[in-house]
């Protein structure tokens, strides 16, 4: 891993400050900018994933349609076994 750039470190410090203050979405913007400054930094990448999940960005959007539910009448049984 290469040495961190000053821009990446500055944005990471902003990320930590806003995360500590409870501003998750502002912190997410800072860590994304840090990742843009250093795209190969695995720490920044993991923090983006961590905070995206914490902000609820990994959940389905409200407008997405869910898969239709199976009918109560449709049966998918594997078969009946009878012992003599």
Image (tube, grey):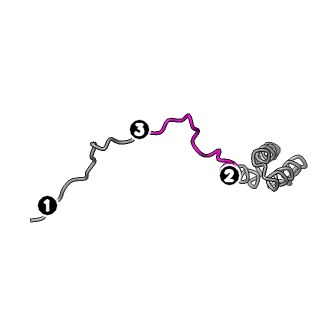
Q: Decide which of tag 1 and tag 2 comes sooner along the chain.
A: 2
Which tag is nearer the camera, tag 3 or tag 1?
3
Gap in Å between the C-alphas at discs 3 and 2? 28 Å
Q: How crowded is mark 1: few (under 14 residues within 10 Å), some or many (20 or more)?
A: few
| Label at residue 68 | 3
Secondary structure of residue under mark 1: loop
Indicate the position of residue 48 as horizontal and vertical percent values: 72, 49
Camera-side residue: 8 or 22? 22
Q: Are marks 3 and 2 in contact (CB under 8 Å)?
A: no
Q: Position of residue 49 (x, y in %)?
A: 68, 50
Q: Which residue bears the numbered disc 2?
A: 54
Q: In which quarter of the image is residue 32?
A: top right
Crowd tier of the residue under label 3, counting other residues whose Cα lies within 10 Å: few below 14, some 14–19, many 20 or above? few
- Identify which residue is drawn at 28% across, 43% down: 74
User: Where does the magenta region start and end?
Assistant: 52-68
The image quarter in which residue 63 lies: top right
**Magenta segment includes 42:** no
Percent x, y of residue 16? 82, 54
28 in relation to 3, above or below: above
- Tell me if residue 58 is in the magenta stretch: yes
| Secondary structure under the numbered disc 3 in the rendered image | loop
Q: Seen from this angle, which residue lies furthest left?
A: 84
Indicate left or right for 82 with 6 as reference.
Answer: left
- Kindly state the secondary structure of the residue where label 2 is placed: helix
- Tell me where residue 3 appears, x and y as whole percent: 86, 54
Majority secondary structure in the magenta region: loop
Identify the residue under disc 1: 82
Labelled pair 1, 2 in contact (Cβ < 8 Å): no
């Amino acid at each position: 891993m290469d040495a961190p750039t000053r821009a990446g470190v500055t944005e990471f410090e902003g990320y930590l400050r806003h995360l500590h203050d409870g501003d998750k979405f502002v912190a997410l913007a800072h860590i994304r900018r840090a990742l843009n400054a250093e795209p190969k930094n695995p720490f920044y990448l993991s923090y983006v994933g961590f905070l995206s999940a914490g902000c609820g960005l990994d959940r389905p959007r409200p407008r997405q349609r869910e898969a239709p539910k199976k009918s109560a009448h449709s049966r998918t049984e594997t078969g009946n076994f009878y012992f003599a």
